[in-house]
Amino acid sequence: METEKCVYRFGGAADGVDVTEGDASMNFVLGGKGANLAEMARLGLPVPPGFTITCKTCMGYANSGNEWQQGVLDQIDAATRDLEERMGKRLGDPDDPLLVSVRSGAPFSMPGMMDTVLNLGLNDESVQGLIRQTENPRFAWDSYRRFIQMFSNVVLGVDADLFENALSKRRLIAGVRQDSDLSAEDLCQLVSEFKAIFRDNVSALLHPELADAAGDAAFPADPALQLRLAIQAVFGSWLNERACLYRKQNGISDDLGTAVNVQAMVFGNKGESSATGVAFTRNAADGAKEFYGDFLVNAQGEDVVAGIRNTEPISQLKANPTFKEAGEQLESIFGILESHYRDMCDIEFTIEQGKLWMLQTRVGKRTGAAAIKIAIDMVEEGLITREEAVGRVSPKQLDQLLHPQFDPAADIEVLACGLNASPGAAVGEIVFSSDDAVKAVASGRRVVLVRWETNPDDLKGMTVAEGILTSHGGKTSHAAVIARGMGTPCVCGVESFQIDAKAKEVRISGTDLVLHEGDVISLDGARGIVVLGAVPLTTASLTKDLDTLLAWADEIRLDGPGFHVRVNADNPKDAELALSFGAEAIGLCRTEHMFLGDRKQIIQSFILSEDAAVRSAALAQLLEVQTDDFLSMFRTMNGRDVVVRLLDPPLHEFLDDPRELAVSIARLEASGAEGERLLEARSLLRRIDGMAESNPMLGLRGVRLSLLYPELPLMQVRAIASAAAALKRDEGLDPRPEIMVPLVSVTREHVQVRDVIEGVIGQVEREYGVKLEIPVGTMIELPRACLVADQIAKHADFFCFGTNDLTQTVFGFSRDDAEAKFIPVYLHKGILDVNPFETIDDAVLEMVSMAVSKGRESNPAMSYGVCGEHGGDPSSIKRFFKDANVDYVSCSPYRVPIARLSAAHAMLELR
């Protein structure tokens, strides 16, 4: 049986090339670097010859316990001999040695994450051959010391600082400031010192192939052994900590592996006529159409990124007479590559004694602002279509433009870490209560609200704070959800913050540090980090380019029936903001948020009073204020749908904290107080305790609340219908409310509540003399509702999926407890790939898909939406549209632009 091809050649003569046609799928065979090297060679660009060992070989090696599979080493040996023949040189030749680089190259760009070895093939004999061939002893010894330094660190794990310290000491002895000023004699001495460092820090017992006659570990002289060990090290770097973390952060599979590229060396450190550099065909920071990058004279590629010498801008390359011809050729190649790949390219090059060589190209990384500008410019230049432009900008890049960020140039030291609950960056003085936040902001100060966790009473402080930090709670906690809705940076679950709100101080676990009210901290809500002091911020803004790109995205997503984007908004301010961000309608208006602040006393009177007259008066007050609320909301959203959810949370959430009340009673008793005040306090505590539930999330809430307290839905529906009727009759507007019944799991729950709703709407129609069209739907957030969706659909006008609670009930997780306690452990151990409260889980999505399918069969006229937190997650949005066939998603205002772009991406993937 023929052995699978594991090695592909590139560069040089046509008979030395195994990839003769461009094919994007080759990225997964050869990795991005290998595929692009082959492609540049195919285009006739100056590429040093070499060969690529496939990504699949890497995974085979890793999955076999770091053992080579049969036949692979034979293919590598054959490719090595072929490269020697093409170059007319041999590895290790004492007269004219071939030197090679060994570099990684994964299918997706992972800059700086994996390892590289340069100048492989040098030993004590071949370095003399290099000296004779180049007549440049300094260059030869510099290349040799670099090889020992890099090989020792990358392949054997010797501490890089040991070599840097020796290098620094040698510069001091020589009296020079830069490595490039060291003489050949200095560098020859360093080679001896580096080999001694290798001997002292590598175990011959662990690496018997390196043992010398004395039993010590000797730096390997055999080029074949050097090459095999280097390839193994590059394969191994696929699983190093930084590479694994990068893949996790960027959603790259661990199963892809990295290719290894073995390539003939060209040298940028052969004197003042040689150089090396990294460049972009456009400005990667702002997208301007200009060459962008750096180069170094008399240096190797690692020197550019290491920052050990000051680089020169690529725009100055042609200005140097020595490099004028190479610079002009490089600019020509920039145009060739950008036209070929139809995108901004990132390029690595070397100039060896005036001759230009191309070492790498790939589609370049860029900021969010640059991504948008480059995409739009390339459409106008005729390089790409609008659809391609929209597809090239990721939601993550878009998110950069919607929130302030830490200045990338800032040098920060992380004080504490938590959960990245709401993106953006904030700087402010610590305050420990919402009242203090309001007072501080009123006096002109900027604050960060620091709490153990937040509750609805904290809303006034949350709305004025620059950022929010809690030591408890997860990414779907009250603080996280409200912060995301407001676009406020938030870090939750900072467990090292031991908060004493009464003393107005924070002790940081594991340190002696104590923070007090007024101390300044900075939050990065995208990374979940806290920094002591004020970090400089870069300000986000909506640009003309962003508006253009989103308009193109809308054209794509609204094609045909379209994928629609709504907003979760509970007040006119959020509604107006969402409209400015491009929301089409309100997909969720949570009426419980209208009961906070001063109105909390009204709902408490209704809940706690045993006097029917008091309860009736409270309902009348609620009706009045709710009607005013809906008048404002419907006026703002004139001509657009507004889905209003009836009261959902259990009533005890509107009551005072029983612990604080118990403390107050204890103080009264200790002071000897008697009489009516104490009796009332005790009675109130009994009533509050009587409403406590063991599991409120599954208790008396949602539709169950409406059935046990029918006065509440009657009041709320009357407020909705009265506001709509008044606007229609008196102002000639087009209000479009829709009423949503929450937490239905039994069909008759919805039927009975709908009967009440329609009865109230009928009464209002007669009172105002207008006809109202108010659809009535249900919020699907329980597995049973998904299973009987066909039955519920016969009595509903729409379904909207509350995926927060649906995820909780499918998993059996309490989301706050899960995110704070064990989900991070599950993610670390690989039990879960993603947090299911951030990105929709397959099983939860299947429940949504099933409910949509059942509903459409039973009631084809219905519409379907998603209004849980997943409605703002790009990955989830695409799956809702593509796999579950919903009509719209609804998200917080600041996520509307991201949802618009994600919906367009979903449509593009379906075409």
Image (spheres, rainbow, N blue to C red):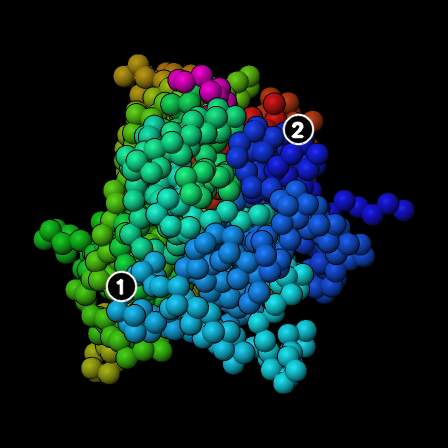
Quarter holding residue 33: top right
Magenta range is: 380-389
Q: Residue furthest bottom?
A: 214
555 sits left or right of 179 in the view? right
Rendered residue at 57%/28% (across/down): 43
User: What crowding class fits label 2: few (fewer than 14 Cα within 10 Å), some (14-19), or many (20 or more)?
Assistant: few
Residue 541, compared with residue 89, is above or below; it is: above
Q: Which residue is mark 1?
A: 177
Task: Determine which of the numbered discs, if any, sits on residue 825 in the image.
Answer: none
Quarter holding residue 726: top left
91 sits left or right of 248 in the view? right
Magenta highlight on residue 644: no
Rendered residue at 60%/82% (across/down): 216
Q: Residue furthest top?
A: 732
Q: x and y percent of residue 612 in the render?
A: 35, 49
Magenta highlight on residue 383: yes
Q: Which residue is mark 2?
A: 21
Q: x and y percent of residue 327 in the render?
A: 37, 33
520 sits left or right of 903 in the view? left
Residue 471 visible to an observer of this rendering: no
Q: x and y percent of residue 532 in the render?
A: 25, 64
Q: N-terminal of the two: label 2 or label 1? A: 2
Nearer the observer, 567 or 272: 272
Residue 857 visible to an observer of this rendering: yes
User: What crowding class fits label 1: few (fewer than 14 Cα within 10 Å), some (14-19), or many (20 or more)?
Assistant: few
Q: Amino acid at mark 2?
A: Glu
Q: Residue furthest right?
A: 1
Quadrant assignment for the C terminus: top right
Q: Secondary structure at mark 2?
A: loop
Q: Secondary structure at mark 1?
A: loop
Nearer the observer, 742 or 118: 118
